[in-house]
Amino acid sequence: MLLENPVLQHELITNLRRTRGFVLLAAYVAFLGLLVYAAWPAEQRLDMANSEEAKKLVDLFFLGQFLLMSMMAPSFAAGAITGEKERKSYEMLMASPIRPSAIVMGKLAASLGPLAELMICSLPIVMICLPLGGVHPYEVVAAYFAMIAFIALFVMISLWCSSHFARTAAALVVSYLLILPLAIVGVLVWQALEQLGEARLWVVFTVVPAVCASIGTLLWAATCRRLLASADLGSEGKQTIDLETEAKESVGLYISRNEFPDRWFAPPKRTTFLSDNANPIYDKEIRSEIFSQGTLMLRLVIQISMMIALPVMAYCLYMQQHLAAWYIAYVLLFNMLVGPVFSAGSVTSERERQTLDLLLTTLITPWQMLWGKLVAGLRVSSVLTSFLMWPVLLACLMPLEYWRNLPTMGGYFLVMATTCVTTAMTALFCSTLFRKSSTSLTASYLALVVLFLGPVAANIFVQTFSPAGNALGVVQLVSLCSPFAAVFNLPLEVSDAVISTSGDFSIFLGHLAFVVVYNLALLLGMRWLFQMRWRVSE
């Protein structure tokens, strides 16, 4: 299972020969080190018995590390099994005498190895913070213990998702949709138990590992059964699924491509000839390519997002109306996760199927290629996002406080529309730049996290540790890149609210200007890549 597991040995040797692990380790430790250095208390003397600044520093360190590990866990594990299918080695692995339990254990241990290495290398940084006082060493041990339990569960969730899909992109987005809510719940529970002292340590050392181990064991057993009777055998994991048969046998959500509103994001297959002015690239992508592997990922995305949206919508839109921006933030986060999936493999999939040269030798112009692939992915992601925005429209029609804030509600919809375009454009640019779909999707997520969430995190950091510093103006200027900052700076006046949001309207206008410039730059860059890099002429 472990000591002589050939899957584990192969994965470790392969990973250790890549420079990605060493670069990631250096970047991870450097980021945490800079974070601690920037938040280090500026006082000459500190009260070692009750240092609030040191406590905030250690809490920030663990919060940042936990969120980083939560985001990196799917990137290591979501492609563990789908990668075998994409490399066409899945059938050979299943035909080997290795038991499915040993395969899953090897993939699990190989995925946990790099993450454990990152956590171990962060120990010297947290040890530097302990002499500042305010934090007991037992609390540090408890924080690491809880982090290890959660990260192991997140890796197992990613492996379970990887066993159900044929593409890494689908497994990655479903993993994020399942993991991020659990990560947020973990942070909220940790902060809620802060005042309980020893009771929090008891919960961390007993309840947390028991729950994580129970869920992880169930997922491990389900993954083993999936490999033992895999439906992907006999086709190298690349089979084209009959959507009608899948719809009849599907559990839960049913998608009919001939009915409303399913045909918005999943139009039926064409039964007639293309018209003279139709774009064949768009028609191929929207009708066949996106759904060639079935609608399982699409159905899971819709169901999971709706289940999470219901309580958030009820509380933020209807019970506490002054928190409407938080529901918009949830929709933005959903689009940031789902939007790149349908565009990040637009060009890289052509390379992986070795059809890019054939496509470039046709009479289709580069602009038709880009337009067709962009609009196809944008149509699916925007329709899925609009399913979460209809409660906002309903709230505007109801006799609520939103009647007085119609310009702000219109601003929410405008920011949402521009964000859909930005996520699709970023993913398509990464797909044009890289050679593998998994690399393109990971790069898209990284770019969107830095672009959307980076300014918000920097603003919170500066306001917490140096509110009177000179960096506050720079952070506010950088916040023009983030749609989250634009949403939270739109004015929202509610009569019975404790706090009314009256932000800076210039940030909203600046964000719209930035989005126009950013997307035009990406579009020109993609046209240049098509025309110069591959020598395609119109």
Image (tube, grey):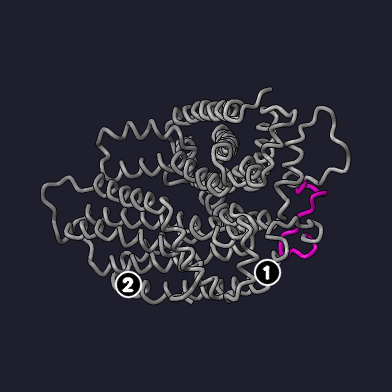
- Name the mark on residue 504: none
- Residue at point 76%, 32% (across, down): 279
Q: Residue furthest top?
A: 538
Q: Position of residue 207 (x, y in %)?
A: 42, 75
Q: Residue furthest left?
A: 45
Q: Position of residue 50 (x, y in %)?
A: 18, 59
- CB contact under 8 Å: marks 1 and 2: no
Q: Main secondary structure of the magenta part?
A: loop
User: In terms of secondary structure, where does tag 1 sit?
Assistant: loop
Q: Which residue is mark 1?
A: 230
Q: Quadrant of residue 463?
A: top left
- Name the mark on residue 201: 2
N-term mark: 1 or 2: 2
User: Which amino acid, by three-letter code, is at mark 2?
Assistant: Leu
User: In terms of secondary structure, where does tag 2 sit?
Assistant: helix
Crowd band around label 1 with a 10 angstrom C-alpha radius: few (<14), some (14–19), many (20+): some
Q: Would residue 261 be found to the left or right of residue 74 on screen?
A: right
Q: Is 178 covered by the magenta stretch? A: no
Q: Quarter holding the C terminus? A: top right
Crowd band around label 2 with a 10 angstrom C-alpha radius: few (<14), some (14–19), many (20+): some
- Highlighted magenta segment, given as a residue range: 247-263
User: Which amino acid, by three-letter code, is at mark 1?
Assistant: Ser
Q: Nearer the viewer, mark 1 or mark 2?
A: 1
Q: Is residue 24 visible?
A: yes
Q: Is 249 covered by the magenta stretch? A: yes
Residue 498, compared with residue 13, is above or below; it is above
Q: Quadrant of residue 354?
A: top right
Q: Position of residue 158 (x, y in %)?
A: 54, 62
How far apart marks 1 and 2 lie (CA) works out to 42 Å
Q: Would residue 338 be found to the left or right of residue 38 on screen?
A: right
